Image: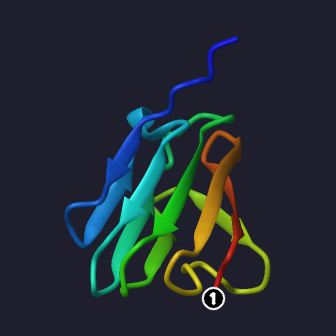
């Protein structure tokens, strides 16, 4: 049985918007300053991706217009270097963020 292949995406700017091509992706940031990942409200139920902080800058996850982002407590940013968070669309436009959050 072959292992599934998932896209690896490196964030190349201080703002990155999740789109359909990010489904199943492993998204990394190597920035030394904060990065903002925007969750688009048009992502369907079942969309999911990993976001990993590989640089000194925290990765902040924010809901785009019309999207709802839920997480434990108030955490919506990676906690530290090498933190990984998982974003999942529970229903269309309604997301849960879990993992190593600050």
Q: Residue at x 36, y 79 (%)?
A: 55
Badge 1 element: loop
Q: Residue at x 60, y 67 (%)?
A: 84
Drawn side of residue 36 relative to residue 40, left or right: left
Q: Crowding near pointer 1: few (<14 within 10 Å), some, many (20+)?
A: some
Q: In terms of image quadrants, where is residue 76?
A: bottom right
Relative depth, front residue between 81 and 61: 81
Q: Residue at x 65, y 80 (%)?
A: 101
Drawn side of residue 87 relative to residue 99, left or right: left
> Residue 47 in the image: x percent, y percent?
60, 38
> Residue 24 in the image: x percent, y percent?
55, 37
> Residue 22 in the image: x percent, y percent?
44, 40
Q: Residue furthest front?
A: 1
Report which residue position mark 1 lands on.
102
Q: In terms of image quadrants, where is residue 80?
A: bottom right
Q: In terms of image quadrants, where is residue 89?
A: top right
Q: Residue at x 43, y 54 (%)?
A: 27
Does the image show residue 40?
no
Q: Residue furthest left?
A: 13
10 lies above or below 37:
above
Q: Quadrant of the N terminus?
A: top right
> Residue 49 in the image: x percent, y percent?
56, 47
Relative depth, front residue between 96 and 67: 96
Drawn side of residue 57 relative to residue 42, left or right: left
Relative depth, front residue between 92 and 49: 49
């Amino acid at each position: 049985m072959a292992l599934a292949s998932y896209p690896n995406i490196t964030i190349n700017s201080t703002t990155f918007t999740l789109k359909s091509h990010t489904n199943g992706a492993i998204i990394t940031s190597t920035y030394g300053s904060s990065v903002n990942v925007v969750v688009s409200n048009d992502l369907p139920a079942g969309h999911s991706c990993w976001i990993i902080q590989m640089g000194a800058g925290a990765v902040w996850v924010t809901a785009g217009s019309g999207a709802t982002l839920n997480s434990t407590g108030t955490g919506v940013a990676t906690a530290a270097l090498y933190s990984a968070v998982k974003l999942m669309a529970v229903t269309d436009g309604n997301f849960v963020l879990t993992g190593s959050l600050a």
